Amino acid sequence: DGGITQSPKYLFRKEGQNVTLSCEQNLNHDAMYWYRQDPGQGLRLIYYSQIVNDFQKGDIAEGYSVSREKKESFPLTVTSAQKNPTAFYLCAGGPGFRSGANVLTFGAGSRLTVL
Amino acid sequence: GQQLNQSPQSMFIQEGEDVSMNCTSSSIFNTWLWYKQDPGEGPVLLIALYKAGELTSNGRLTAQFGITRKDSFLNISASIPSDVGIYFCAGQLYSGGSNYKLTFGKGTLLTVNP
């Protein structure tokens, strides 16, 4: 089935450790996005990428890093510099700037808990 | 930046009741989207609106793109228990070029009592 696949679904990490969340897509979307979701705060954009080997900071990029070496993959690393990393992370893909209307398709999410 | 106000924040209704929620923006959009998120899952697109005044239905769901281009509403008729979840509105203003980011509302949490 076509879609956005995130892994792992649940992840536990000790303070001070980096962790990488995987996001893969087979929709041939140019653009990919990472959002963070906290209760009552909606979706906040962390990073996005319009094209391979290029990415831009979103509204809350501090403490996070990404790479876009392949069109299908957009992993997110939550570094030890992120002060409050416990959250639900959502990856999404969309047609991006090539399309007038950028309708996003989301993955099922990854829940990160810092112990 | 663009601000989206979504209301209400939460709703508790009885099965069979109709539901209405809306989003208002401080600036105009070209596209309004409505998503539903089930607990522990990612949001799923319900309805996409592309033109001011457009009224679109998807089963028991109806959404409208406001004439001013600064608001949109979503109605759910005859609610059922599986309607439970968080409903998000999202807007986009594009004029060609690189403006392709969506602005999301904070969501409406819907609880349906059987």
Image (cartoon, coloured by chain):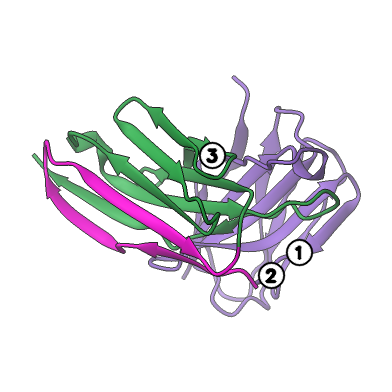
Chain colours: A purple, B green
Residue tagged by mark 3? B49
Which residue lies at the image location 46% right of the left edge and 70% below the top edge?
A: A115
- Mark 2 is on which residue type? Thr
Which residue lies at the image location 59% right of the left edge and 43% below the top edge?
A: A7
Residue tagged by mark 2? A79
Res. B41 visible in picture: no
Mark 1: few/some/many CA within 10 Å (<14, 14-19, 20+): some
Is residue A27 left or right of B103 when viewed as pictured? right
Q: In terms of sequence position, does the residue under pointer 2 or pointer 1 come before the other? A: 1
Distance (Cα) linking label 2 and label 1: 7 Å
Residue tagged by mark 1? A65
Please determine whether, in this image, residue A59 is positioned above or below residue B8.
Answer: below
The local secondary structure at tag 3 comes to: strand
Choose between B4 and A50: the one closer to the eye. B4
- Which of the labelled discs sits on residue B85, or is there none? none
Q: Are marks 2 and 1 in contact (CB under 8 Å)?
A: yes
Point out the stretch of residues depicted in magenta: B1-27
- Mark 1 is on which residue type? Ser
Res. B55 visible in picture: yes
* Dot in front, 3 or 1: 3
Do discs 3 and 1 share a chain? no
Distance (Cα) linking label 3 and label 1: 33 Å
The local secondary structure at tag 2 comes to: loop
Residue furthest to the top in view is: A1
Can you give x and y, in whole percent of width and height, for residue B107 in the image? Answer: 40, 58
